[in-house]
Image (tube, rainbow, N blue to C red):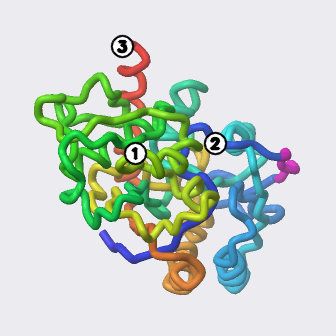
Amino acid sequence: MKRTIAGLLTTATVAASLAACGGADGADGAAAGGAEPEGPIQIGVADQAQDYWRTFEELAAEAGIEVELVNFTDYTQPNPILSQGDLDLNQFQHLLYLANYNVAADDDLVPVGSTALYQLGLYTTEGYESPDDIPDGAEIAIPNDVVNQARALLVLQSAGLIELEGGGNAFSTPAQIDEEASRVTVVPVDANQTAVQVNTLDAAVINNNFATDAGIDPTTAIYSDLQDTEAARPYLNVWVARAEDADDPTYLELVEIYQSPEVLEALEEQNGGTAITEVVPPEELQAELAELEELVRTSDAG
């Protein structure tokens, strides 16, 4: 697996409740099996203003591929619009979000390439330099929405501050904390309040977008799940296509273009080094998606 440091995107791509935008215009797109596209390949994104997309578009044009970025501010839109055929690809979500969508919508969208793992960080205003410095009995704020709460618990477990029964998973709750084996108490609050609570509690786990909005430098996190990428793997962001287009050579070429050094260098230059880009084979991503979908079904059944 190739890894390279990439930058922070300030949109909330790691959140489970993502936001929606205007609709996309219809497009013929590339047909399954690699037929020549009849118009630009439309890609649903949530961060079109980021400069690295200009590098991507230029490289795609050099390869003879015309692309059109369709920006969304409501993350509930790109998947159904892709499924309906009015987008060709999208690139805005992590694996767990896609798993939740597929199960809820009875859909079969598939990941065809990886992008980046964006950190979920632990912050403090108490002067602690590492999780080891946080005293026993400390109180730590975490987001209370389902996906970010579980992820925050995994961050705290990786940091050695709590232990979760059975090792935890992407749907863990505070009720599954082994209090006898844990050093701190968690305080679930609305995600947008974590950046406020860090000023009154010992520490807080804060999403990058809320940290940025509050004027907190994301690079000041004393710990993040980038230090335990296996635990954070469900939150790896991906390129997504319809199942019948999973092997489309033009789409796969676009993924390779995105993963080129030129695009990644643009990410590094533009952003602050709070993400890791991982190049993972599509078949591996699809196997992990299937496991997450089963976890979603089991969680729903429970």
Q: Position of residue 39 (x, y in %)?
A: 83, 63
Q: Residue at label 1?
A: 201
Q: Are marks 3 and 1 in contact (CB under 8 Å)?
A: no
- Principal SS element in the magenta part? loop
| Of pointers 3 and 1, the one earlier in the residue sequence | 1
SS of the residue under disc 3: loop
The range drawn in magenta is 22-27
| Location of mark 2 (residue) | 18
Up the image or down, 73 lies above or below 256; here it is above
At horizontal 81% and vertical 53% (from top left) the residue drawn is 28
Q: Residue at x 37, y 50 (%)?
A: 203
Q: Is residue 155 left or right of residue 45?
A: left
Return the mark for residue 183: none
Secondary element type, mark 1: loop
Q: Are marks 3 and 2 in contact (CB under 8 Å)?
A: no
Q: Secondary structure at mark 2?
A: loop
Q: Which mark is residue 302?
A: 3
Picture coordinates of residue 72 (x, y %)?
75, 51
Tag 1: residue type? Leu
Q: Is residue 263 left or right of residue 31?
A: left
Q: Tell me the quarter of the image containing the N terminus.
A: bottom left
The Cα atoms of the two marked residues, 3 and 2, are separated by 24 Å
Q: Quadrant of the C terminus?
A: top left
Q: Nearer the viewer, residue 264 or 214?
A: 214
User: Which amino acid type is marked by label 3?
Assistant: Gly
Position of residue 79 measured from the top left corner of the image (x, y, whole percent): 66, 41
